[in-house]
Amino acid sequence: MTELLEEAPPVDERSVGMTETHHSTLFEPPSELRLGCRSKFGPVTVAWETYGELSPARDNAIFICHALTGDAHAAGWHANAKKPGWWDGFIGPGKGVDTNKYFVICANILGGCMGTTGPGSINPETGERFCRDFPVITVGDMVEVHAELVRSFGIERLLAVVGGSLGGMQVLEWAARFPDRLDAAVVLASAANMSAQGIAFNAVGRRAIVTDPQYNAGKYYGEAGPRYGLALARMVAHITYLSEASIERKFGRRLQDSEELAYSLLRETEFQVESYLHYQGKRFVERFDANSYLYLTKAMDYFNLADSYGSLANALGRTDAHFLVISYSSDWLFPSSQSREIVRALLERRRHVTFAEFDSPFGHDSFLIDVEGLEKMVVPFLHRTLETRRKKESGVSRQESGEKPSE
């Protein structure tokens, strides 16, 4: 839901400025998308935004994969909005992903509720919303849709694919599914499969939604809907995005509206941390769809790159892309051990990989918050990738023309 802006957005020379979300329709019959569940699906509408300019050689395109509840609006400002894009601190002129140098694409994922076809969309065959008739989707399906979108732009090979959390899972799937279509992969706070603990938290969130009396088997559109269940799901999930240190520092045991304990079971927000979680749940209900939450968390649970390709080394060993893998010391949802598993698989196949564990107090959300630290790794990594690609393509061009490379 867009928040109205009373004043013009602040002037920022490092911002991409005003942006707009566009839509494309892909996989129209008879060329439907073949889903991981083996059924066909189409057409698919995709919401997307771009920043920067595509070079004449089409060699500077970077695709940004968003996390679970993100959208295509990664940077800049929308008209009448209070906040910029969700990664505005990292994408823009002179920032981590420099739009003076790179052409940046971000698109909402399949199954989402921010403009791309999902369970809340209209089923063209019935004229009604899909609801629970929407097919079960996988991370691979999301990547297939985005790969087709990139191809529709006339881009055959991306300079890099970048993403964190569920976005990082998409990056790994890009590298495994389309090994020849990217030069670099940046995987942040992510893993090659969801852990049992992560699956457990997702299961609790889904249970909170489907047991809400207002869920109505997913057919709640036009009504109040499962707002309490969705809010509870968000509250539980949000705890996993933080770290113990960050919660203690921000809230401790401080009370919200009193200096003394109330000794009452009726006070739901007696502590500041309780008030914060209730606020997060309320705001989430205003902008996200419960059915999309069910489908997307299930897609995360199903993601297992090693199972899909026989082993993790097999999955990632077919690409010559350079990898940058970053984890965070306080992230207990996607701990560093899972990032190191990715690194080991790449080294087993003698692939180029750079790994860093950042000492951050912000937990899983660190990749969205600590953008300055991230910039120090990503800026030179992308610069080297672009230089390497252009040198390689320049050498190929000289060979094709019969010109000898310079000494």
Image: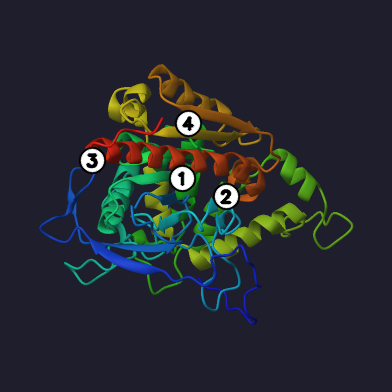
Judging depth in this view, the residue of 42 and 263 nearest the camera is: 42
Q: CA distance from mark 3 to mark 4?
A: 55 Å
Instruction: State left or right for residue 32 relative to residue 263.
Output: left
Q: CA distance from mark 4 to mark 1?
A: 25 Å
Q: Is residue 245 above or below residue 92?
A: above
Residue 113: where, in percent of width, then height? 40, 62
- Disc 3 is placed on an element classified as helix
The answer to whether residue 362 of the structure is visible from this angle is yes
The answer to whether residue 137 of the structure is visible from this angle is no
Query: Which mark is on residue 401?
Result: 3
Residue corresponding to mark 1: 162
Tell me the amino acid under the disc marked 2: Gly
Tell me the amino acid under the disc marked 1: Val
Q: Earlier in the sequence, mark 1 or mark 2?
A: 2
Q: CA distance from mark 1 to mark 2?
A: 11 Å
Q: CA distance from mark 2 to mark 4?
A: 33 Å
Could you tell me if the residues under marks 3 and 4 are in contact, i.e. CB atoms within 8 Å?
Answer: no
Look at discs 3 and 1 and give the one toward the viewer: 3
Residue corresponding to mark 2: 96
Q: CA distance from mark 3 to mark 1?
A: 35 Å
- Residue neighbourhood size for the residue with mark 1, other residues' Cα within 10 Å, grouped as few (<14), some (14–19), many (≥20): many
Q: Earlier in the sequence, mark 2 or mark 4?
A: 2
Residue 301: where, in percent of width, then height? 40, 39
Residue 379: where, in percent of width, then height? 56, 44
Q: Earlier in the sequence, mark 3 or mark 4?
A: 4
Residue corresponding to mark 4: 196
Q: Residue furthest top?
A: 348
